[in-house]
Image (cartoon, rainbow, N blue to C red):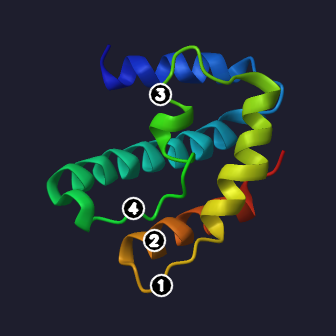
Amino acid sequence: MNLQGWINSVRDIMRKDVGVNGDAQRIEQLGWMFFYKIFCDKDSELQLAQGTKYVSPIPKGLHWNAWAADNEGTTGEPLLKFVDNSLFPKLKNLDVAGNARAILLRDVFSSFARRVQR
């Protein structure tokens, strides 16, 4: 499936979600998902390239592949609770310790967390 087809499929699913109100909110949610998926993919590439020298800024259990990559993974209310109570709070409060990737991740999720309301 091409990117446009995937986006349309996701938008169709999101239109049925009672927790998402309107295209503006769907676009914003797709935005943080795209960003995070790409960020996690790059994180995996860096881990492969640098091995044990690389320290991921992503807390354990929050990497995309730990919760979103499984087709049979968490959905519905448990997923919303995970995103609202674990993913966003932990990412927007990352200990950045001068790590540029951690700063980027924290800043992006701080920005989204201020705007995403359920």
Secondary element at tag 2: helix
Of circles 2 and 1, which is in front?
1
Label 2 near label 3: C-beta < 8 Å? no
Q: Is residue 19 above or below residue 34?
A: above
| Amino acid bearing label 2 | Ala
Q: Gap between marks 1 and 4, in whole Å?
A: 12 Å
Reading the chain from its start, which is encountered first: label 4 or label 3?
A: 4
| Image position of 21 (left or right of 14) | right
Callout 1 amino acid: Ala
Cα gap from disc 2 to disc 1, whole angstroms: 8 Å
Residue behind mark 2:
102
SS of the residue at dot 3? Answer: loop
Picture quadrant of residue 15: top right
Q: Where does label 1 land, which residue?
A: 97
Spot the residue most to the bottom.
98
As drawn, the residue found furthest toward the left would be: 49
Name the spot of residue 89 as percent of width and height, x first.
71, 61
